[in-house]
Image (cartoon, coloured by chain):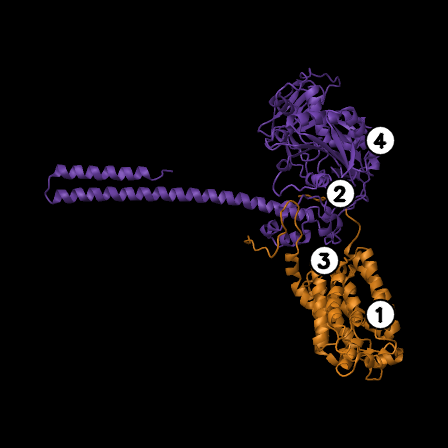
Amino acid sequence: MIHQSPHRLTGGIHPDERKDLSCDVPVRPAPMADELVFSLQTGRHGLEPCVDDGARVLGGECIARGTGSFSQAWHAPTSGTLHYIDALPATDAYGRPGPGLRLVPDGEDHWCDAEPALSRDDSRETLLARIEWAGIAGMGGAGFPSHIKLASDKPVTTLIINMAECEPYISCDDALARSQAADILRGAAWVKHILGAQRVLIGIEDNKPDAIAALESAAAANPAVDAEIWVCPTVYPSGGEKQLIQILTGEEIPAGQLPQALGYHMHNPATLVAIYDAIEHGRPLTHRLVTLTGEGAADRGNRKVALGTPLHALTQLAGASSDSILIMGGPMMGFEVRSPAAGVVKTTNCLLMASPNELPAAEPEQPCIRCGECATVCPASLQPQTLFWQIQADDAPRAQAEGLMDCIECGACAYVCPSQIPLVSYYRHGKDQLRQRALDQVKSDRARERFEARQARLDAEAEAKAAKRAARAAAMEAAKSGEDPRKAEVQAAVARARARAKQKDTPDT
Amino acid sequence: MIHRPSPHRRRARSTQDVMRDVLLALVPGTLVMLWLYGPGVLTNLLLTLIAGVATEAAVMRLRGRAVKPPLRDLSALVASALIGLSLPPLAPFWIPLLAGVLAIGLGKQLFGGLGHNPFNPAMVAYAVLLISFPVAMTTTWVSPTRVPDLLATLGHQFGGADGWSGATPLDRYKDLATRLTQSEIAQDPLFNAGLVMPWALLALAWALGGAFLIWRRATFWHAPAGLILGILLPAGVFGYDGDQFVPASMHLLTGATVFAAFFIVTDPVSGATSPRGRLAFGFGAGVLTWVIRTYGGYPDAIAFAVLLMNLAAPMLDQFTRPRVYGHDAARKGPVLEKRS
């Protein structure tokens, strides 16, 4: 069933979509690279390898596991020899080198046996454990571990599949829906089952008619899921979690809360396919669709890429010109790749190889003329110009009071700014400052507590000493005045015992 | 260190483009002014532009900053042109020169240049000149029924010649209304072609430019709508009595009302920035304009009204914040969080 969403997001912009660069080519597999690299810096607590240096591994074998509860395992996408390496750049905006794994494929692509398929009779814990085992993380961009998201104990009424894909250039979700719509719905059926949700909504922008048609026929073929397709107008950033919920339901997620607060759960379609693969085929997450696009690339399109494929292998595959600017993600929220030696991660949805004219370097920043254009496009109804002034004045707390933490960093404000101010960078800086202040606050609280405890202990000790001294003096006095010395001794002992008891009562830290 | 922060794409529309649109939007009104008031309009404009741009360049040099970027953004041209077009067409030559220096030097650069001035630079210059040189600023207007030629204009501006200049229609009407009725006022030679007629044409030309700006999204409709509403509301209520009060049509179509609506209260730097704030800013300026025009001693009141509202703009912004996504209510009033 196709519905037109009756609600709109606030603000928003209409950048050139440029999806035609990549979406017309059918999905092709990328040839296996000469080596695959896996950063162990991924995830909140880092990963540790679970095979030995120099070991031979089979496809599908777990090669690294998370160390904390936010674990995201890596599995070998093919068979080969595994080495430990240092100084592998992380796949993020900073590209800081760190420990990693290098897999040299042997070209035979032997796979280990798949795990047994699970069924509806298996417990929720078993299903979640399987998802954790498969190393599935949100593949839309945030990369949050799916088993933790799905383990939420808040009652969920509605599963929302985020097919909006509002970033320009990116078309991997579109390609996925056109080639694997049935699998998306199968995955949705599992997530619906795990969450106990009643409704499944698919939110999709109207610039993807083929995907809408594919999803519609897949939904008709899988009536058990009872998926409703909601088409919304193409406007950036309709794919933001908060924004898509606003568009589909007209409701807003209360500030500082997750969609679960309203009974919503949102997932990326690629994540759903990975969940379906893990549960029904017992296969871990080892591949994903990556959009290779941009005017700098000669051979554009969506490719099925092994995780860990170095980015330079992809630029080579796409025939990128040497002067092209390499951006992971889209032009609005993606980041410039610092080192093409970094590998594809679970959130690598797009590699944009832009010609220098396509994404010209930022012009020098000019003074803000307070035109207010940014406020008209902000999807959170913030006053970006005010936040900018306050952060510029080094007053992040005031910016926070004006809603800095409600900023989703979509970049719509910076997109329209006639003064070329990199607004999003200012907001990130302000948020960093707030985080730092919170940390400093915790630290200073702790220091104060320690100081106060020490002071209390010293005071108690001094008091006890004084009591002892007084007791001794009393005994001496008694002895001098010629009283019974034994009586004085007893008195002194009593005084000492009292002092001890008093010392025990005071906290000892 | 991130070299290229996101977003990597930007809409190709710079401050310079916005300013160029404003300059273009001034063209039809300037042409009509030229036809109504003669060549004095052009000499005024030329002299303020020269003085304004020279002041901008000189101050940037004094401050040890690059001179070219601020000139390239065209904002000095816009501010100078706005004050140049506000001056009486037969003002002595040193008035436009001083106007350019005051607008850019006192109104803009003294506060730190583009984007930092709390007051509208053109209106700062206008107010200073009006208070300092009331005679030169109020008696050198031209009656559209008797337009001086170039020679007469230059004689007025550079020599001591006289014989062409007079008051503005608003001033004249107010003056005559103290002793005459509306029908008698209409007999005055200044109103030969009707109470509003020649000036209404000028208002129309400014409105044309304003429509262009709104169509180009170089400005928003809120402040102009607010100003016109703010003037028409009191003028409509009191204007029934044409024997005592200036009628609403004259308030709207003569004087600087439409010009100010689209080119003065729309100044983003010194105005309110939220949509409702802009509406309130315009409305406040409109009401104040009517009050000062009616009860004050000056022929026009836009400059004072706008300067007063400039003072209120930051507060207006604080009381007109929209409700942020996910919050129950809009946050009103100043934020007084403890500073770091």
Pointer 1 and pointer 4 on the same chain: no
The image quarter containing residue B45 is bottom right
> Which residue is the site of mark 3?
A369
Q: Position of residue B29 (x, y in %)?
A: 85, 67
Q: Earlier in the sequence, mark 4 or mark 3?
A: 4
Q: Which chain carries label 1?
A: B
Mark 2 secondary-structure assignment = loop
Three-letter amino acid code of the residue under disc 4: Val
- Name the residue carrying label 4: A25
Whether residue B290 is visible, yes or no, is yes
Mark 1 falls on what kind of element? helix
The chain coloured orange is B
Question: Do circles 1 and 3 both sit on a common chain?
Answer: no
Q: How many marks?
A: 4
* Snapshot quadrant of residue A367: bottom right
Disc 2: which residue? A236
Q: Is mark 4 in CB contact (under 8 Å) with mark 2?
A: no
Please name which of the two marks, 4 or 2, marks the residue nearer to the observer: 2
Q: In the image, what residue type sits under mark 1? A: Ala
Q: Do the residues labelled 4 and 3 touch (CB within 8 Å)?
A: no
Query: Which quadrant of the rendered structure holds the C terminus of chain A?
Result: top left
